[in-house]
Image: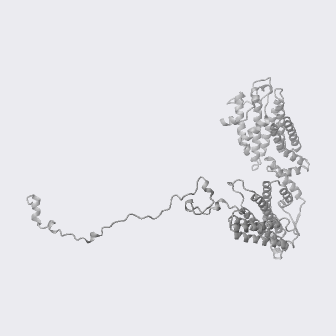
Amino acid sequence: MAAERQNEVKISPVEENKENSIDESLGVEILQIIKDSQQQHGLRHGDYQRYRGYCSRRLRRLRKTLGFKMGNRHKFTGKKVTVEMLSDNRHLLLVLMEAERAWSYAMQLKQEANTEPRKRFHLLARLRKAAKHGEQLEKLCESPRVDAKTKLEAQAYTAYLTGMVQFELQEWKSAMEAFNKCKTIYEKLASAFTEEQAVLFYQRVEEISPNIRYCAYNIGDQNAINDLMQMRLSAGGGGGMMAEKLEALITQTRAKQAAVMSEVEWRGRTVPVKIDKARIFLLGLADNEAAITQADNEETKERLYESLLAECRDTIQAVREELRTDAKQRERATEGAESGKVSNLQYLHSYLTYIKLWTVVKRNESMAHALQTKLKEPQTDENKRGPRPQDLIRLYDIILQSLAELSSLQGLEEDHTFQKEVALKTLVYKAYRCFYIAQSYVLVKKWSEALVLYERVLKYTREVQSKAKSLNNSLKDLPDVQELIAEVNAEKYSLQAAAILDTDDVAEVPTQQQIKDNTPLSDRLENFRLDPTLLSKQPNLVQFPPDFQPIPCKPLFFDLALNHVAFPPLDDKVEQKGKGGITGYFRGFFGFGS
């Protein structure tokens, strides 16, 4: 709590000097205060409950500081800030925190309403409460004691909260008017201040722009959908509530178009599409592919690929469930398979599987292209692990696995043209995979293995060129084979020279591969070897602890002569016992026989 009081947003020093002055104007930087508070107390991670708790605690501290009591401990007495009370900036801050507390509670309920729809009613009530506090703040700022900037910010803040309420009620026209008012005020404020101060206002304008376009589309402006689709390419997509609305809008638009879609044609066969989920997916397929093509960076492209694959998996699951539940259709599919033709539903399943597998191929090809670019760039940081040929080999393995599944799709076994196209694509990607396997052998100086693999790459490329003549436009979507041939020839000649000289001019072997054993310096003084670890903090100079070595031990002496010594007899010196009998016993007992 003490740290929170230190970190909470303060009123500017100029305003603090004017706190107790009634004659001078009052002012609060509304947008700056709420943005700083939100970032410091939970909204950076989307934790609205934490921010609501902060607003409640700050309200308690403000009321205690201002002596603004709401009754006593036994009875609550409602009390509102009036224009006559305005003698301190904190009176305006009090109303602002009440609006923020209601707004944060509404956003918390919106997150929970995804699983509990009944909370939507409570959400609307809290939003209306926040808008009511915003209107009260705007009325207070109409006082001549408040400066012009605070008045404009209060109007923009109230318009924003009103627009949020109308947006949730789906009153698109009213919401658009409120958001436009808010946008206009913030743009005017941004133009009146320096660039550093205007950044915050422009950020708020960017936040509400998607809401305005969304309202315009729902009113009837069909051109607004193009702007919203462009926003989907950005990483945030509008952020938070607007991101959910945008996805719902795209799905709704496709659903309207899907009502008139009844069939799809693929490889010369027309198949009826009766499943709504499949219709929506097939209608949005062209838009998704166009969005991937227009993506600016690899991160956005990867995100769009993942989104497309997720939609495709859900659609395939829906078709698969339809195949399982429709027993008659399954029987007809079995009969059709006997006659060499699969059912329409099974053919649709094969088409969707083809889309999924080919999307996987294109995604991995895009990732491989990005890795190839990084692989050719010089590594500036030696401690950071860069891309290696092994990473590309893994990507091409996944591509070849997807192509193998493509060739076994049901309904396409007799399509010889399709099988030839898949075989041709397999040869192209095999050539690239073989090329990077050779590159990995070059790194470890296995010249002969790498040379054989380069020859195998040239063999694959010759097969591709010979088979591509019979297939028109078969290499249009594939990597360029001519570039691969030129690169292989260059690498092959460099490899032959490096094998003869056995130097590191062509391939820089990593440090951990230069020294294949941990022999210390003391054991290899006769051989020169470049060892950078000798200059490090832990050089390998000697082996410690040293190994055990055999040494001569102290001899043991045994007295063997003792066994051959003959001792003299001692019978005459040994006392004879046992000759006295019982008489001797009594003599010794009474003491007179000694």
- Whether residue 184 appears in this view of the structure is yes
Q: Quadrant of the N terminus?
A: top right
- Residue 200 position, x and y percent, is 80, 39
Is 81 drawn above or below residue 131 in the view shown?
A: above
The relative height of residue 18 versus residue 133 in the rendered view (above or below) is above
Residue 139 horizontal/vertical position (percent) = 83, 31
Residue at x 80% of width, y 56% of height: 301
Residue 567: image quadrant is bottom left
Choose top left, top right, bottom left or bottom right for residue 433. bottom right
Which residue is more in the foreground, 402 or 342?
A: 402
Q: Residue at x 68, y 55 (%)?
A: 382
Residue 369, quarter of picture: bottom right
Residue positioned most to the front: 526
In this rendering, is residue 165 above or below 357? above
**Position of residue 78 in the picture relative to residue 477 (left or right):** left
Q: Quadrant of the C terminus?
A: bottom left
Give whichever of 330, 315 is nearer the camera: 315
Pick out the residue farthest to the left.
592
Residue 128 position in % (x across, y down): 80, 39
Q: Camera-side residue: 486 or 119?
A: 486
Residue 288: x %, y % from top left: 84, 57
